Amino acid sequence: MKNFLLFAIVLILMSCGENEMQKDARELAELTLKAVQIQKKIESGDKSLLPESEKLGTELKTLIDEFQKKYPLDGGGLKFGALYKKIYNEISNKPEEVVDEAEPPNPLEDKLIAQTKEILMSNAFYTATNQESIIVFNFNDTLFTFRVLTNNGIELSRAIGTYEISPAIDGSIANIKIYLEGPIQKSPLYSDKTGIGTELFLRFNKELLLKYPSEKLVSYLGTLNILTMGNNKPNYFLVGRDVFYSLKKNTQAEKDSIVKAEIINEKKKAELEEKKAELEEKLKGL
């Protein structure tokens, strides 16, 4: 009897939680649909709705902030997002079998994508395949670039494509899928005999998890990567079949500062050379 009562209490609590999540998802879906409908009217020429659109935008942002805290991606966020989409489709009379229409905006996933892109774009991701070469992943807003380089920076091969960000289910920051576009470019120096099969490497690393650093991930790098990394401490890892560590890219201001410092150093070097030449001329006359 005691176990039955405990089971009944658990069911009631779970039901309450489900009902609350459904209520929240419906509230967000209804407000989103209203904002979308008003925006369509504004785009059709009804500018009188602009004040109402701004008011709805503020309400929507407040609600999104509340639900992002209430349903984090690692604590109910995925379920809430799926429920929100389902309700949005129902109340907007969108047939479930229609697959070519745009998905309803999902603010929880939108925030994840924006944060993940910021990380990917501000870092380059490296892994050393052998003592003679290193692989680099770079990302911009829509594309990835994959390059195989020799240790002295000569490019052996390059691949370009698009990428897709989605929530991860294992506690990682995000899941990234890459899609190769066009042929892989290879220099005359490229040789698969060196152990760098670009096509195969990309196929094995088609799906990557963006993760925060941990001792376990560092241990996966191996001695070669540890030596290549030097004193740099990565803030992030990309993990597929292989493990890639991050190095932060210089900002434009930092690049400009480096160029300026190099110009100053070259100028000082030229001045020293000039003074040295003048001194040598004077010494010849003694």
Image: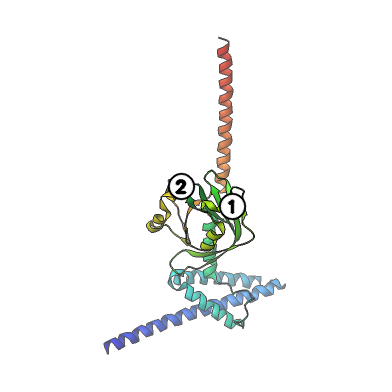
Q: Secondary structure at mark 2?
A: helix
- Single out the residue that lies furthest toward the right: 45
**At which x and y percent is residue 205?**
51, 61
Residue lying at 40% horizontally and 55% vertically, measured from the top left: 218
Residue lying at 45% horizontally and 72% vertically, measured from the top left: 71
| Mark 1 crowdedness (10 Å alpha carbons): few <14, some 14-19, many ≥20 | many
- Left/right placement of residue 269 relative to residue 234 reads right
Tell me if I can see residue 250 in this picture: no
Residue lying at 62% horizontally and 72% vertically, measured from the top left: 53
Q: Give the vertical position of 4 relative to 27 (above or below).
A: below
| Mark 2 crowdedness (10 Å alpha carbons): few <14, some 14-19, many ≥20 | some
For disc 2, the marked residue is 228
Which of the two discs, 1 and 2, labels the residue nearer the N terminus?
1
The one of 153 and 103 positioned closer to us in this rendering: 153
Indicate the amino acid at tag 2.
Thr
For disc 1, the marked residue is 157
Name which quarter of the figure residue 43 lies in. Answer: bottom right
The C terminus appears in which quarter of the rendering?
Answer: top right
Residue lying at 53% horizontally and 54% vertically, measured from the top left: 196
Tell me if I can see residue 76 in this picture: yes
**At which x and y percent is residue 255?**
57, 44
Name which quarter of the figure residue 114 lies in. Answer: bottom right
Q: Secondary structure at mark 1?
A: strand
Report, in whole angstroms, how far the alpha carbon at label 1 lies from the one at label 2.
Answer: 20 Å
Q: Give the vertical position of 222 relative to 271 (above or below).
A: below
- Single out the residue that lies furthest toward the top: 286
The N terminus appears in which quarter of the rendering?
Answer: bottom left
User: Which one is in front in this view, the residue at disc 1 or the one at disc 2?
Assistant: 1
**At which x and y percent is residue 172?**
45, 64
Marking on residue 41: none
Q: Give the vertical position of 283 relative to 112 (above or below).
A: above
